[in-house]
Image: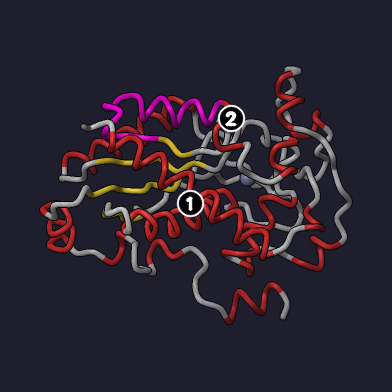
Amino acid sequence: MTTSDARAAGPPELPDLDPGRYDLAGLTSDGFAALVTDSRPFVILLPVGSVEPHGPHMSLVTDTVISRGACERAAQRLEQGPILARIAPSVAYGVTECAAGFAGAVSVPAEILTDYLGAVMAGFLRTGSDHVCLVNNHLEPDHDRAVRAAARRFRPTQASVACPLTRRWARTLSDEFKSGACHAGRYETSIVMARAPALVDNPVRRQLADVPISLSDQLRAGISDFAEMGLSRAYAGAPAQASAAEGHDLLDLLADMIATEVADALASRG
Ligand SMILES: [Zn+2]
């Protein structure tokens, strides 16, 4: 099946409006109120992503797909906790200056992202949720800072950030991720192949040469533009080596990260 056939035949790949078991989209106001009055903590998982190029083989909305996929597994895990978790509609636009030279990069100013996320979080807390976790998988440092700044506007028991950029979580992930050559390479491509296979063009992916350039090293050296880094096709790493099986394992690790960040934050309520 070609990518376009799969798109035409398959269900929607971004189910913000196609409620799965844990999607906020499946709740009425009364349903939400029932979760607020439940004796268990009621947590909102808010997927955060970006709209930016991910190589010649993968969707512009890759980072949001990764955040959502991880949230789905985390919600299931938290409920065994027992913590009630629901996945909010995604915030799919972020700070995307590194990719500015490529078609399809849509960047918003950092302070606007912080204000917007802060307002959404305040809204969820005001309407009775106990906690909001920002689940971010767009790893540009300015974007990460803007996301964390939003969470800092609230008490630590009310807000958390789950993002694999921190040392605590980065070291749990794959070798490619740890090498820093992790934009639209084996790591991200594997996850999208696991969660939303129609968003990866496999014939193109299989032809792609490895680009062993560490984004973290480049950023440390003061280079923040993808083209200047040598990412001439907006990817680094080894997308040809990606697999859905690896993606499922990585989604489980990201779900562990989310469930742990939320449980730690709630535990500090005493
Ligand atoms: Zn990405």
Q: Kindly identify the residue that appears in the image at 67 percent across and 74 percent down.
A: 4
Q: Nearer the viewer, residue 203 or 171?
A: 171
**Left or right of 76: which side holds 270?**
left
Q: Kindly identify the residue that appears in the image at 75 percent across and 22 percent down.
A: 223
Q: Which residue is mark 2?
A: 167
- Is residue 149 shown in magenta? yes
**Left or right of 159: which side holds 200?**
right
Q: Position of residue 202 (x, y in %)?
A: 76, 67
Q: Kindly identify the residue that appears in the image at 28 percent across and 38 percent down.
A: 266
Q: Which residue is mark 1?
A: 255
- Magenta segment, which residues? 142-160
**Left or right of 87: which side holds 222?**
right
- Is residue 264 shown in magenta? no
**Residue type, numbered disc 1:** Ala
Q: Position of residue 124 (x, y in %)?
A: 24, 43
Q: Position of residue 173 (x, y in %)?
A: 63, 44
Q: Assess whether mark 1 and mark 2 are in contact (beta carbons under 8 angstroms).
A: no
Asked if ligand 1 lies within 8 A of label 1, the reply is no
Q: Give the mark nearer the N terminus: 2 vs 1.
A: 2
Q: Nearer the viewer, residue 223 or 36?
A: 36
**Left or right of 242: which side holds 30?**
left
Q: Quadrant of ligand 1?
A: top right
Between marks 2 and 1, how big is the CA–CA gap?
16 Å
- Where is residue 228, by image quadrant? top right
- Where is residue 183, by image quadrant? top right
